[in-house]
């Protein structure tokens, strides 16, 4: 089965409410869909969400990378799969979201060729999952109401966006905690908005009040590895690295430094499925659990992440795959089923099972 063409489409969907963090505000999902066509009639689908403040990519740069890589891929045989993955990974540096979109489409094709759902091709068995939901950064009273609404909708884990620092973040976390009750787990995400000292002060203040979040995600700047270790040595709240981990080298060095407790794996951050699997294996070697997260991605790339979570369910024990639930509607046919906090891989999927 040979690749005969690679095409792209835009995928757009409005969000239910604006998504706001310490880094950005977004009102609609706008992603790039990649279609890899073969001489057998099969088409593989991939997707990537441009996130300039994190990966440095835009729709324009992603299109340029895909156009650059097309001549290396067209005419190649899918049976030379490892070679195809090397082409995507090594013919151009960085550009991890564009690479991820291409890889997802290639893995979709490989699973279709094998007449298997992708998770089975990857060695997975688990088909049912639960995700958290993000509470965007807003005035505290708005965040409290948003949190209560998500609990009413059945979510038992909330990801609270913080990052303004000082007493304002302490107050908003405390008010949400008491409003939703102790039965609801809170994950905090500062999106690099705190300093190491601020992180210790805020988390220590919460812990003294009897509030122990399930984790704090990326409290300091991505390159502040010593800051992560400084925090880890002084608080009880587990430290989850997100923007600090793009590559296997990043993960290994942070683990060797004993600077983190967990790793957030994102396909668009590490360059796709192949590196996501390797990151999970590396974390497993160190006895560290992982979260499988996403950018503001649609159901093709988020669905691919669910298949990866199934394949590495012994290490990937937390999901932050709420992007589809944040949209007003699902713009894609087929694939993984998203029903609020419940995510299910249907029995009858072949490959990703999507069409757009």
Image (cartoon, rainbow, N blue to C red):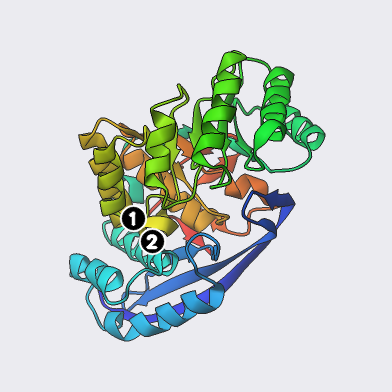
Q: Residue at x 29, y 61 (%)?
A: 110
Residue contact at pointers 2 and 1, CB within 8 angstroms: yes
Between 210 and 46, the one nearer to me in the picture:
210
Residue 313 is at least partly visible in this image: yes
Q: Which residue is rendered at x = 43% and y = 45% of the image? A: 306
Question: Quick one: which residue is furthest to the bottom in this view?
Answer: 71
Q: Along the line of sight, which residue is nearer the eye, 238 or 295?
A: 238
Instruction: Point out residue 352 in the picture as x, y percentages from the top left corner.
Output: 42, 55
Does residue 265 sit above or below 259 in this rendering?
below
Q: Quadrant of the C terminus?
A: bottom right
Give the quarter of the image for residue 315.
Answer: top left
Element under disc 2: helix
Taking the spot 21% from the left edge, 66% from the top edge, the residue there is: 81
Residue 246's mark? none
**4 above or below 43?**
below
Q: Nearer the viewer, residue 12 or 221?
A: 221
Separation of marks 2 and 1 at Cα, in angstroms: 7 Å
Callout 1: SS: helix
Please tell me the numbered disc located at residue 273: 1
């Amino acid at each position: 089965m040979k690749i005969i063409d690679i095409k792209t489409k835009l995928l757009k969907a409005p969000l239910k409410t604006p998504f706001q963090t310490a880094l950005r505000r977004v009102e609609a999902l706008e992603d790039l869909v990649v279609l890899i066509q073969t001489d057998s009639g099969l088409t593989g689908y991939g997707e990537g969400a441009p996130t300039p403040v994190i990966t440095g990519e835009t729709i324009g740069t992603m299109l340029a990378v895909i156009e650059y890589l097309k001549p290396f891929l067209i005419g190649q045989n899918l049976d030379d799969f490892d070679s195809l993955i090397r082409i995507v990974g090594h013919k151009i540096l960085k550009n991890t979201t564009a690479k991820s979109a291409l890889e997802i489409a290639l893995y979709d094709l490989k699973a279709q060729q094998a007449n298997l759902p992708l998770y089975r091709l990857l060695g997975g068995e688990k088909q049912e999952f639960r995700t958290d939901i993000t509470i965007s950064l807003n005035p505290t009273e708005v965040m409290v109401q948003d949190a209560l609404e998500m609990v009413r909708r059945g979510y038992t884990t909330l990801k609270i966006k913080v990052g303004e620092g000082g007493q304002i973040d302490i107050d908003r976390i405390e008010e949400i905690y008491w409003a939703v009750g102790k039965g609801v787990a809170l994950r905090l995400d500062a999106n690099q908005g705190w300093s190491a000292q601020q992180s210790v002060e805020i988390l220590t203040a919460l812990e003294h009040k009897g509030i122990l979040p399930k984790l704090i995600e990326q409290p300091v700047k991505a390159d502040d590895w010593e800051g992560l270790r400084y925090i880890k040595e002084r608080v009880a709240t587990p430290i989850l690295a997100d923007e600090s981990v793009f590559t296997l080298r990043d993960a290994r060095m942070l683990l060797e430094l004993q600077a983190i407790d967990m790793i957030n794996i994102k396909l668009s951050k590490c360059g796709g499925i192949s590196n996501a699997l390797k990151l999970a294996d590396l974390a497993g070697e160190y006895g560290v659990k992982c979260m499988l997260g996403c950018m503001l991605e649609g159901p093709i790339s988020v669905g691919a992440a669910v298949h990866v979570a199934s394949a590495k369910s012994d290490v990937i024990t937390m999901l932050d795959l709420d992007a589809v639930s944040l949209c007003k509607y699902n713009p894609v046919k087929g694939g993984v089923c998203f029903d609020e906090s419940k995510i299910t891989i249907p029995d009858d999927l072949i490959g990703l099972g999507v069409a757009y």
